Image (cartoon, rainbow, N blue to C red):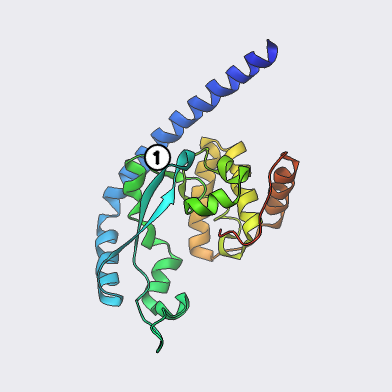
């Protein structure tokens, strides 16, 4: 009986936390979608000049509870191909301008509207393809118990410098520990990362890996995308 009461209290607390998180998302995304309209227009113009049309690149991603939706980003790569007709490596299909747009993350501004639609959150694990999440088994399911975000705990602790296991560990640590205060802290760290660049936070990574290993039944298959 006591255990049931504790579970009910936890469920009520988590539901309340998610309502506050949604309100935070609406306030921040709503404000930014208005304030950044000139930046969105400037980015669209830059993309048109650098890589042409279409301006928006869309891909299917898994959202909360693995429900799929289409995520939009400004295009930052051309369709340049080699003599055999194969697409060139990503780095060779980016211009100096689009590399800069990616570094300061303005290519992700269209995702503000996904937040307003309720498909994403401002802070949360980055949305991945459904097949990738299924390859992670129970870890992927747990990762999808919260809405995906524009930025997340993994993105401010190393992002592209992390291994797949490290990213998953950081994401699951976030799922188990997220709060409004933490979301606001991640937003501040994201701004710092944009300005100063990515850096590995070894202490946070090791803590997340330990947390992941203490969870029962979670397996990390090799080769899954992060």
Q: Locate the C terminus by quadrant.
A: bottom right
> Alpha-carbon neighbours of circle 1 within 10 Å: few (<14), some, or many (≥20)?
many
In this orientation, does residue 127 appear?
no
Which residue is nearer to you in this view: 7 or 216?
Answer: 216
Q: Which residue is mark 1?
A: 25
* Above or below, 122 relative to 6: below
Question: Residue placed farthest to the front in the image?
Answer: 84
Quadrant in the rendering for residue 161:
bottom right
Residue 194: image x %, image y %?
48, 62
Quadrant in the rendering for residue 107:
bottom left
Which residue is nearer to you in this view: 165 or 182?
Answer: 165
Residue 94: image x %, image y %?
40, 77
Which residue is nearer to you in this view: 125 or 31?
Answer: 125
* Above or below, 56 relative to 46: above
How many numbered circles are shown? 1
Q: Locate the N terminus by quadrant.
A: top right
Position of residue 140 in the picture relative to residue 222 (left or right): left
Residue 217: image x %, image y %?
71, 40
């Amino acid at each position: 009986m006591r255990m049931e009461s504790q579970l009910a209290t936890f469920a009520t607390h988590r539901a309340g936390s998610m309502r506050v998180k949604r309100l935070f998302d609406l306030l921040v995304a709503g404000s930014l979608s208005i304030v950044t309209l000139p930046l969105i227009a400037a980015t669209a113009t830059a993309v048109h000049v650098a890589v042409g049309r279409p301006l928006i690149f869309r891909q299917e991603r898994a959202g909360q509870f693995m429900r799929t939706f289409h995520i939009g980003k400004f295009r930052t790569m051309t369709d340049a191909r080699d003599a055999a007709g194969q697409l060139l490596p990503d780095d060779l299909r980016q211009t100096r301008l689009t590399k800069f747009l990616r570094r300061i993350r303005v290519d992700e501004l269209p995702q503000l509207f996904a937040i307003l639609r309720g498909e994403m959150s401002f802070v949360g694990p980055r949305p991945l393809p459904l097949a990738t999440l299924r390859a992670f088994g129970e870890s992927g399911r747990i990762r999808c118990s919260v809405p995906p975000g524009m930025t997340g705990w993994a993105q401010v602790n190393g992002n592209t410098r992390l291994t797949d296991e490290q990213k998953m560990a950081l994401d699951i640590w976030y799922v188990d520990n997220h709060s409004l205060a933490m979301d606001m802290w991640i937003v501040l760290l994201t701004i710092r990362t944009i300005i100063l660049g990515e850096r590995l936070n070894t202490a946070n990574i090791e803590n997340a890996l330990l947390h992941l290993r203490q969870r029962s039944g979670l397996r990390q298959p090799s080769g899954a995308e992060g």
